[in-house]
Image (cartoon, grey):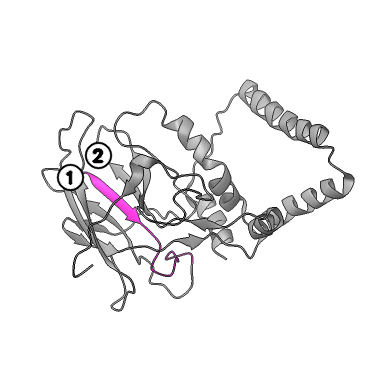
Amino acid sequence: ASGSRATERFREHKQFAAGVSQERVNLLASRLVKAVNDTVLEEKVTYDEYNAFKAWLIKVGEDGEWPLFLDVWVEHSVEQVANEHREGSKGSIEGPYYVPDAPQLQSPATLPMREDEAGTPLLFQGRVTNVDGEPLAGAHVEIWHADDAGFYSQYAPGLPEWNLRGTVVADADGFYQINTMQPAPYQIPTDGACGQLIAAAGWHAWRPAHLHLKVSAPGHELLTSQLYFTGDAHVEDDIASAVKPELILDPTPRADG
């Protein structure tokens, strides 16, 4: 259900590029169609394989998993193009589980969570600056992540609406301090069409544990990124190909987390 929920969210909150020119559509669509036909000819695709592919494409739509498929296997390339001009911190993919308008919290903040929230307490802190190192007072650090079982609120049943989601306002020095729980690695949904592809190809479905971030300040470009953790088994083979060396954290253990 989390895959189809991503389709609903996309329709609710994303803007479509209605102004794309005919020339650009012609170029991109022609390149895509040519790539598919080149694969058919080079790999000698049979009618059985072609019909299996057609049936799978239909099922992706029926399962509502196109956002899941595209965000896992394609978005990392779109993100690379979108941020190739950027100085400062590295960006990463947004993924399919973002929800806008998370509750606003002043730093130091504790993300909304259940009284018995499982996992290891995590203190995530830092400073938002411009590329010259000057602090950005009142910057917004929007954060969301999976729980200790690998589930996202609003995409898995039984979780409070804003569990482990929030928009933290940095102080006058751009400093933010966020108390949360360390997220767990998780498998992307495998009970629909994307799972069928993974099984048929013999791939794994794992994403390493990560924090999602959107960092913004007036007059500055929005940064969308993810942060990972040293020692995670899947930082080297993330199914979404979104890990960058600059985005890996090395937390310091303490007695309380």
Amino acid of disc 2: Ala
Task: Find numbered disc 2 in the image and state the secondary structure of the residue it sits on.
Answer: loop
* Residue carrying label 1: 138
Do the numbered discs 1 and 2 sit on residues whose CB atoms are within 8 Å? yes
Q: Main secondary structure of the magenta part?
A: loop
Q: Is residue 112 magenta?
A: no
* Residue carrying label 2: 217
Quadrant in the rendering for residue 198? bottom right
Amino acid of disc 1: Gly
Residue 139 image position (x, y, % from top left) = 21, 44
Quadrant in which the N terminus appears: bottom right
The residue lying at 46 percent from left, 33 percent from top is: 80
Relative to 106, 245 lies left or right:
right
Relative to 37, 123 lies left or right:
left
| Residues rendered magenta in the picture | 139-155
The residue lying at 13 percent from left, 48 percent from top is: 171
In the image, 70 versus 38, the foreground residue is 38
The residue lying at 24 percent from left, 36 percent from top is: 218
Task: Find numbered disc 1 in the image and state the secondary structure of the residue it sits on.
Answer: loop
State how far apart marks 1 and 2 are (Cα): 7 Å
